Image (cartoon, rainbow, N blue to C red):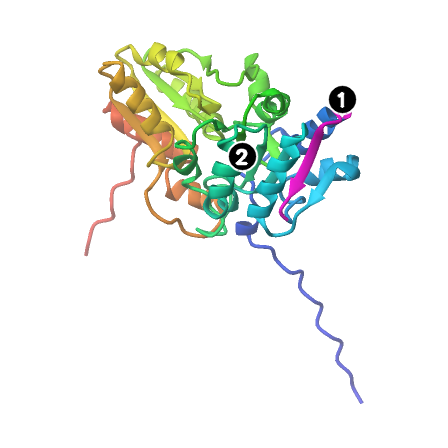
């Protein structure tokens, strides 16, 4: 009797939509910068506590949990209860960092954030992972409108960091801030970019990372990394681009924005957020209220629910990739549009 050996089992493939990473291949990164920064800060400050809505591993809060288990609170999948508990902890003098996905912090628990935390102006730090288009899971997990929701909340400070440098330096300043904060968290292997620019995070302040005569990019979050990449690419075409990084969305550094906008340069805003209610509208209103005549060109996500899929594909599709930024700027300037192969003749 002959026997047949079992076919070797194929390794189960993981779809790229499940990998929430926007880092370029081979790019310098730091692992879990938020978790490490919070754990380090907690060594010096016993009042620091951490909370998670059953997502510690996916918000890098597990680093803090493992270092300070007696000061970590697992609240389960209940963001409203977590925010209420964080408010109570702040009322008795502790400094809580409460982590979940941005969609749950904003869509699901806004009323608790607003009335339990922001109205009494408590020092509660909300940490929202997967902001904007940093996951391929689709609309249920893509927090593309979180800034629009939260910018209208009084007392709330909003930070959108570019990279691991921003995050590591922001954590102590958020803890020191007198009032509630919301951090758009970049988690996992986070690119390290700003260390090459002599940059220091300052809460409420923008930073000009490079100067340029022709175009000024006003960017926030991960789009500052893309702005710097696009500026370097455009330099090869003799387009001189300045980059103003705006890590604090609220309060906005209006003086810095007006300083770079009061020129005849093309002003382009870049954000990982819907074009409605985010950085572009904040910059445009700042310029309009000041009577400055600069036109603002937004690079942002469209006002629609986005598709699921692989992040590189989605960033190309929705205009956040470096290639898309370069093409957009060339088209706006005119005469520098990228060459396109002509369509084949019809037969």
Near-viewer residue (211 or 204):
204
Marks 1/2: CA distance? 25 Å
Q: Are marks 1 and 2 in contact (CB under 8 Å)?
A: no
Quadrant hosting residue 260:
top left
Q: Secondary structure at mark 1?
A: helix
Near-viewer residue (298 or 174):
174
* Left-right relation of 283 to 74: left
Residue drawn at x 68%, y 36% as measured from the top left: 50
Instruction: Please say whether residue 175 is visible from this viewpoint.
Output: yes
Q: Position of residue 72 (x, y in %)?
A: 73, 39
- Furthest toward the bottom, the residue is 1
Q: Position of residue 313 (x, y in %)?
A: 44, 45
Q: Quadrant of the C terminus?
A: bottom left
Q: Which residue is labeled 1 in the image?
A: 44
Mark 1 vs 2, N-terminal side: 1
Magenta span covers which residues? 43-53
Label 1 crowd bin: few (<14), some (14–19), many (20+), radius 10 Å: few
Residue drawn at x 56%, y 40% as measured from the top left: 21
The question of residue 48 being in magenta is answered with yes
Q: Which residue is labeled 2 in the image?
A: 117
């Amino acid at each position: 009797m002959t026997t047949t050996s079992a076919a070797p089992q194929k390794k189960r493939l993981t779809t790229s939509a499940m990998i929430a990473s926007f880092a370029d291949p081979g790019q310098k990164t730091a692992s879990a910068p938020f978790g490490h920064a919070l754990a380090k800060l907690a060594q010096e400050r016993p009042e620091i506590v951490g909370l998670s809505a059953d997502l510690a591993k996916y918000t890098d809060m597990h680093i803090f949990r493992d270092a300070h288990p007696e000061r970590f609170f697992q609240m389960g999948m209940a963001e409203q209860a977590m925010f209420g508990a964080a408010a109570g902890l702040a009322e008795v003098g502790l400094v809580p960092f409460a982590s979940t996905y941005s969609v749950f912090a904003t869509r699901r628990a806004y009323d608790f954030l607003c009335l339990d935390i922001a109205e009494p102006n408590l020092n509660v730090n909300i940490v929202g992972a997967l902001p904007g288009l940093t996951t391929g899971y689709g609309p249920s997990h893509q927090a593309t409108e979180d800034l629009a929701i939260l910018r209208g909340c009084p007392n709330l400070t909003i930070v959108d960091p570019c990279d691991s440098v921003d995050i590591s330096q922001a954590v102590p300043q958020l803890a020191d801030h007198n009032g509630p904060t919301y951090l758009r968290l970049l988690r996992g292997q986070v690119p390290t970019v700003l260390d090459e620019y002599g940059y220091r995070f300052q809460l409420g302040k923008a930073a000009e990372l490079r100067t340029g005569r022709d175009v000024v990019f006003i960017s926030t979050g991960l789009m500052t990394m893309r702005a710097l990449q696009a500026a370097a690419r455009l330099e090869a075409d003799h387009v001189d681009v300045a980059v103003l990084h705006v890590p604090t969305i609220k309060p906005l550094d209006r003086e810095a924005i007006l300083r770079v906008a009061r020129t005849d340069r093309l002003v382009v805003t870049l954000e990982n957020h819907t074009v409605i209610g985010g950085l572009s509208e904040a910059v445009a209103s700042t310029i309009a209220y000041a009577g400055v005549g600069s036109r603002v060109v937004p690079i942002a996500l469209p006002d629609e629910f986005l598709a699921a899929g692989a992040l590189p594909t989605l960033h190309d599709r929705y205009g956040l990739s470096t290639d898309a930024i370069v093409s957009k700027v060339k088209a706006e300037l005119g005469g520098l549009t990228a060459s396109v192969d002509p369509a084949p003749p019809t037969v």
